[in-house]
Image: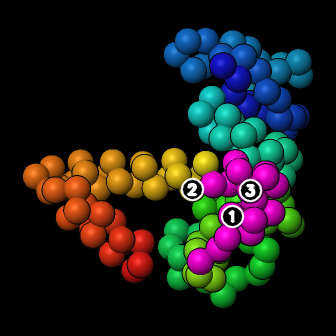
Amino acid sequence: MSVVVGCTGCGKIKIVESDDDGKPRYSKCRCGQPRVLLLTAIENEERWLRGIGIEDWFAAPKTPRTRGECFDGPRPCPHLRCKHHLGVPGKMGCELDVSEAGAHTYEQIAAALGIDSENAAELVRVEIEQAYERTRKRFPGATRRELVAVLAALLAA
């Protein structure tokens, strides 16, 4: 597993392999100063999957704590570390902005994510199944019809 570490002396940022417990294998930089953990393996994997470079990740402004703090902010959204950010800086923004814009076709979803419409349809199907399962766990005694009604009400809200 890879983690991101930074040197306390020269300030260099580096991706290094970690032990099974998630600690970096190399605790000192070439300059002799200790390294500190900047991103855990999970955080680094998320950064990598979203296609965000290390420099962009650390240069991004502080992530707002609430939707109200970023509602009237600059667009496209510069908060790369936010869990609602959709990807590459300057090209895509916030999933909350997209959802507030209303319903979208598979073609629009595909264009926004850079995939084809068949993959967008599959992605939507999987998301709906996961939402259904979360709803089923939340209301264990409900019938299928009741669960679908609850899920539809949540999606409409």
Label 1 sits on what residue type? Tyr
Q: How many residues crowd mark 1 within 10 Å: few (<14), some (14–19), many (20+)?
A: some
Q: CA distance from mark 1 to mark 3?
A: 5 Å
Q: How many residues crowd mark 2 within 10 Å: few (<14), some (14–19), many (20+)?
A: some
Which residue position is annotated with label 2?
A: 124
Which residue position is annotated with label 1?
A: 106
Front residue of 65/11: it is: 65
Residue 61: x %, y % from top left: 73, 65
Q: What residue sits 53% from the left and 52% below the top?
A: 125
| 142 up-or-down from 22: above or below | below
State how many labels appear. 3
Residue 66: x %, y % from top left: 50, 73
Mark 2 or mark 1, earlier in chain: 1
Residue 131: x %, y % from top left: 40, 55
Is the residue under label 3 in contact with that under label 1 (CB below 8 Å)?
A: yes
Q: Name the mark on residue 117.
A: 3
Q: Which quadrant holds the C terminus? A: bottom left
Q: Which residues are magenta?
A: 103-121
Q: Specify whether 96 is left or right of 5.
A: left
Mark 3 or mark 2, earlier in chain: 3
Q: What residue sits 84% from the left and 44% below the top?
A: 53
Chosen colour scheme:
rainbow
| 12 up-or-down from 113: above or below | above
Label 3 sits on what residue type? Ser
Is the residue under label 1 in contact with that under label 2 (CB below 8 Å)?
A: yes
Circle 3 SS class: helix
